[in-house]
Amino acid sequence: MNAPIDLLTPPRIVELAVVIDRRVEQSALDFALSVGQLIVQGLYGGNLAAWRARGRGDLSFRQLSRITRVSASVLYRAVAVYEMSCRMDVVQWGLPMSHLRAVIGLPDADQCRLLQQAKRAHWTVLEMERACATVRQRGRKTPLGRPPSPALIKGISKLSRALKAASQAPVSPSALTTAQRQEALDALDEQLRQLSAIRHRLLSITA
């Protein structure tokens, strides 16, 4: 076991850990399917929706992972593969465990599509992982929530914050040297010129 059994760990979780430890000699796929089912039944009453909602952050799952001979990531993958098998006939497809692991975390539709393609085209593990990486990369490029602000709006927002900070700074002979005052005036003149140009461009496209 990974750690001494906490006296506060419920007996049902201790019993589940013992059963899981007895299955570590099974093949990778058999272990995943049997242990995944044990966890879903033992911790979530057979309710896959509860697993999806609570997952590996669930207290019972964390307690279980601390007292078994396998890591939390292995237990998580086992449940993910079992959940996948409940949606798709992955056992009958004859795909190796490495292909099933590769699609964990992808949307259901992508999992099914990629596994079917892997079966038809006899993909190697490397080909499978590359295809999954492409899907994940595409998902990261999809914007979520509010669309990004245009560069002009971002720039004006930064300028507003900078002006607020500058307006609170002391302006006196003791705070700035003659050279610094002249440098600040020259910079402000140039910034005012640029702001005026931006304002005129905005006015020209504003009805």
Image: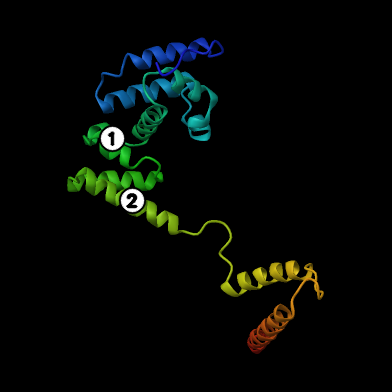
Viewer can see residue 8: yes
Query: Mark 2: which secondary structure?
Result: helix
Find residue 128 and report its horizontal and vertical position in percent: 26, 46
- For residue 202, what is the image quadrant? bottom right
The colour scheme is: rainbow
User: Mark 2 and mark 1 in contact (Cβ < 8 Å)?
Assistant: no
Q: Label 2: which residue?
A: 133
For this view, does 174 lie left or right of residue 193? right
Could you tell me if residue 207 is visible in this image?
Answer: no
Residue 63 in percent (x, y) is at 50, 20
The three-letter code of the residue at mark 2 reads Ala
Kindly state the secondary structure of the residue where label 1 is placed.
Answer: helix
Cα separation, mark 1 vs mark 2, equals: 20 Å
Q: Amino acid at mark 1?
A: Val
Task: Identify the mark nearer the N-term, 1 or 2.
Answer: 1
Q: Residues within 10 Å of mark 2 (few under 14, many from 20)?
A: some
Nearer the observer, disc 1 or disc 2?
A: 2
Q: Residue shown at 74%/76% (left/top)? A: 177
Please give the name of the residue rendered at 24% of the width and 24% of the height, measured from the top-left corner.
27
Taking 149 as reference, is 106 left or right?
A: left
- Image coords of residue 114 (percent x, y): 29, 47
Q: State the residue in front, 189 or 98.
A: 189
